[in-house]
Amino acid sequence: MYDLSGSLDGVVPGRRVVRDLEVRRLDGRGTQGLEPLVAFGDLRHLTLERVSHLSLAPLEHLALESLRIEVAGGLELGTLAPPATLRRLTLFDLDENCAVPKSLALPFAFERLTVIETRAGHTGAVVQALLEAVDWSRLSGLKSFDVRLGGLHDIEPIELDLSFVGSLPDLIYLWVTGVHHRGPGPSPLEPPFEGLSRKLRRLIFDADDPDAIRPAVQAYLGVPVSPLTEGISVRQRRPYEPPRPAWTILSPADGSGVWHVYGSLADAAGMTSDQTETQALRDARRRLHEADPQLLCRLDFDPESSGTGISARSREDLERALKILGLAGTEQPR
């Protein structure tokens, strides 16, 4: 495995046999973009992470077997002409400004497609557009299909005609969450599970009535009818509730006397996507210490990868902290 960061301009494999390559923080504006990769004739597995404003056209000249794009913006996905060798494609957290083609023809021998969006404040628009663009008639041999919206953060579900799942008889792995079936016919994830692959060994999806769906799908697949059956998970579908605005002040719950706010300090500071919430919190603590060191001592911080919780014993302390950090705050009872 080799990895590169920044511009690829002038990069050549030299005497190295480069089969696995990870490219990070590449902005195609003012550079050659991915064009230097054409010289990497041995490349089989490519990961593009935290990249932006790229044409994917150069990739058609490579014999790639797998392509993973994670956290990306301004991509021209319509320029992707997948080589016949491509077997696996993963698209993870693509910004809404990525240009999606009307049609995406993956190779007939393609095996694994993963399309996921997990980030707070983002939508499933790109996921929906991509899945609607795929020519599913070419993918009868697909073995793994994974589409998810949300995770740690709720994202509004998308509506999609899932009937194409019934035309994938070789599926072994299927994960569909955050997607509601909307089509002229029944969903293949509801009885009688029309066309659903009987080869499935791992199946995860959500439903309005999982207790009714679970034994039915287990019977269809010929596996033991039990809530603990390994490999089969039917999850409760919850009504979508829009998230509270960042830095909403939440009043104490259960008599704890503790007030809370939550939001991304990195987003508020305008940091780039490869800078961390931990770094943003360090900067925020420094600013608070400079303005009011005693206030800082009265605050508790709970950082996560995508945001930071701040708590205090008084609403006034939170309001002052938000003011110092230039963050908006409104009170909302729990």
Image (spheres, helix red, strand yellow):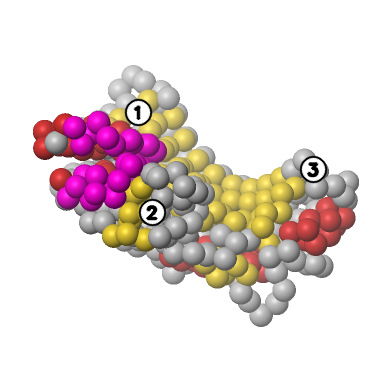
User: In this view of the protein, which residue sits in the foreground, 32 or 210?
Assistant: 210
Mark 1 or 2, closer to the camera: 2
Q: Which mark is residue 251?
A: 2
**Residue 202 at x, y percent in the picture:** 71, 45
> Start and end of the magenta stretch?
294-323
User: In this view of the protein, which residue sits in the foreground, 65 or 257?
Assistant: 257
Residue 61 seen by the camera? no
The residues tagged by marks 1 and 2 sit, at their Cα atoms, a distance apart of: 47 Å
**Residue 210 at x, y percent in the picture:** 74, 59
Image quarter where the C terminus lies is bottom left
Q: Which residue is mark 1?
A: 3
**Residue 118 at x, y percent in the picture:** 46, 50
Q: Residue at x 30, y 33 (%)?
A: 278
Q: Residue at x 30, y 23 (%)?
A: 14
Q: Which mark is residue 228?
A: 3
Mark 1 or 3, closer to the camera: 3
Q: Looking at the image, is mark 3 or mark 2 earlier in the sequence?
A: 3
Q: Looking at the image, is mark 1 or mark 3 earlier in the sequence?
A: 1
In this picture, is 121 found above or below 172? below
Helix, strand or loop under label 3: loop
Structural crowding at the residue carrying mark 1, measured as other residues with C-alpha within 10 Å and reported as few (<14), some (14–19) or many (≥20): few
Q: Residue at x 49, y 64 (%)?
A: 241
Q: Amino acid at mark 1?
A: Asp
Residue 168 seen by the camera? yes
Q: Looking at the image, is mark 1 or mark 2 earlier in the sequence?
A: 1
Judged left or right of residue 88, residue 276 is left
The residues tagged by marks 3 and 2 sit, at their Cα atoms, a distance apart of: 39 Å
The residues tagged by marks 1 and 3 sit, at their Cα atoms, a distance apart of: 41 Å
